[in-house]
Structure formats: structure tokens, C-alpha cells
Image (cartoon, rainbow, N blue to C red):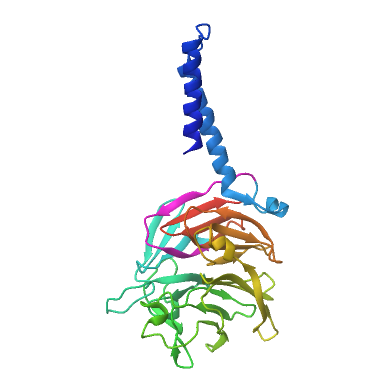
Amino acid sequence: MNYRIWLTARGISFFSLMNKRCPAFKLPYLLISVLILSLCNRAYSQAGKADIIERLHPALDTIITGNPQLTTIAQGFDWVEGPLWVTEKRMLLFSDIPANRIYKWTEEKGKELYLSPSGYTGTTPRGGETGSNALLLNSKSQLVLCQHGDRKITLMDAPLDDPKPVFITLADNYKGKKFDSPNDAAYGKNGDLYFTDPPYGLEHGVKDPLKVAPYQGVYKLSKKGEVTLLIDSISRPNGIAFLPDKKSLIIANSDPLKPVWYIYDMDQNGLPANGRIFYNAMEASKKERGMPDGLKVDKHGNIFATGPGGVWIFNQEGEVLGKIKVNGPASNCAFANHDKTLFITSDDKVLKIDLR
């Protein structure tokens, strides 16, 4: 039972009893009861604020100050992912994957359709997660997309201010083996693009007859257009991000049988080495909704990673500093305003929280 209702009921009962049994007790118990309800509402609200942030380490106090609120800024989607804050345009872009669309959000106009189709341009109807997933800007501020339906990494051949579903293919295979569904991506130190390729965009997952590679890959796309297979041992590679110095790479594994984040050292050739578990979320995944999914790293090297129960915040040593609790599975996040604002995609809605 909701404790606010319980406390209010008990308070009203108490004053009602006192009024009946003690004639000298002339206080207007109804007014007192209203006051109790107000106080309980206030306590409930403050408890809700405190509950949003789970503080597990003193270092979190320099990252998240006060008791910030999660605000829903857009909703009514199928499954949102791939948030990208475009600073110069003051807009947030994000993918609604099953709907095969990209939306934008601004303070002035709220949500608007930005691009359709976004990930599947074929004419044959098909099911599954067909749209775009991760969205990035290259060094020329052009939009780069991980496309599930077309199974490609592409570049939108149109300005950000005038989007059109016209795409240039950057990569769609490795040694003749068609990708499954490029999911998330991050740029390395020299401008090479690193991306994950789980099976989620295939209509029938790992059992899809169109699946070619017998593994789930993590790849590198060089500036010259060459594709290199980096890792084939992660069962469900998903979110991917570099630490600020680009010397370490973190990859989320969204496999219920092994819900972990991995970390790799990057060698002088831009290749991952010394792979190891950064954090194992198996126990948390048994209690809360969500898997290790998208992640972002702030300028100080703190990792904001969506996972069981919301957004986990790690330092570079893999210590959990705290969590932002989300009511529903969180899929990804994006920073804005010099890391002071965080946008979170979660199921059918987009959330916003001011960290400082």
C-alpha cells in the first residue's frame, strides 16, 4: 500500500477518534487531516526526488549535485535509441527503431519528425527492428547512421537543416559477409569508426536465414573505407565508447546470460587488446529491468552506462559511483550543455535530467 495514503488515513482516524472521545479536543480535525495530507505529499515528493539518484560513492557528489528530477520530454514511440545532441543546432536527434524514423526535439517546438525512413529503405515489407539505431556526427558535422534494416553504416547525403532519406554507404560487409545490424559506434583517436554488430535488427535474430557471419562482431571502419574485424567473442555486443584519452574502449554485452561491460586497451595500431570484464551486472539483472546497453563518457572519464534499473555511473576503475533510477528499461543516453544535462532514451519515451 502507498505509504502516503496509509499515513493520511491513520492521521484522519486519529483526529476523528480524539474528537469523538475527548470533548475538550476542539481542533477541527478535518483541517488537521488536510494539513497531514499536505505534509505527506511533500514528504512523498521529497522521497521521490531522493530516490531518483542512488549515491554509492562520495565522488558522485561532484558529478550530480542536489536532487535533480527526471523529466519526460517526449513520448509515444515504439522503442527509442541512439540519442545525439547537436550543439550548434540546439536539438536532440533520436531513433524510433521499429517505426523506421528519426525524431528531433528542441526546447521551442518539442518533438518533430526528422527523417523517414531512417534505417530500412527496401520496398519489401518486413518485421523486426528496421530503423536506424546510433546516430553520430563525423568531423564535418555530417550525420552518420547505424542502419538496422539495410544492415549498413551510412552517411546522410543532405544537410542537417534539410534532412532527406538519401544515404551514402560507408560499409555493409566484412570480406563479403553482410553485417547483421550495426548498432552503436564511436570514433577513435585517428578518426576511424568502431562499431558493434549484434543480431537485433534481423527479423528472426540469430536464427534469421539472412544471417551470414557465424559470430557477432565488433569492427573498425578506417577513414579509407577498410573494414577490420576486431572482436568476434562477445555474444551480444551493443554500446561502445572510448575513454577521453582514446586508450581504452568499453563495450556493453546485452546478453541475459552474460550481462557485462568489457574494457580493452588500445594498442598503437588502434586495435583492442587485453580484453577483460569491466563490470558484471548479473546479480542486478536478476532484480531489475534492462541489460547493459548504450553508454557515454563525460570529459572527466566518468562512464554513464544504461543497464539494469537505469543509468549506471562508473569511474575509470570500474567502481560504481551511483545510479540514475529509471522506471523502465533504459537504452542509451547523450550529454548536452558541457555534460551538465543528460538525455536518456527509455522504451517509448525520452527523459531529461540536469546533473548540475
- Residue 346 x %, y %: 46, 58
Residue 68 located within the stretch drawn in magenta = yes
- Residue 16 x %, y %: 46, 17
Q: Residue at x 57, y 74 (%)?
A: 186
Q: Residue furthest left?
A: 124
In-front residue for pair 91/151:
151
Up the image or down, 225 lies above or below 193; here it is below
Q: Residue at x 63, y 59 (%)?
A: 313
Q: Quadrant of residue 258?
A: bottom right
Q: Is residue 45 visible?
A: yes
Up the image or down, 6 lies above or below 189; here it is above
Residue 69 located within the stretch drawn in magenta = yes
| Stretch in magenta | 66-86
- Residue 177 x %, y %: 45, 90
Up the image or down, 247 lies above or below 287; here it is below
Question: In this rendering, would 226 be left or right of 111?
Answer: right
Q: Residue at x 57, y 40 (%)?
A: 47
Q: Residue at x 50, y 64 (%)?
A: 84
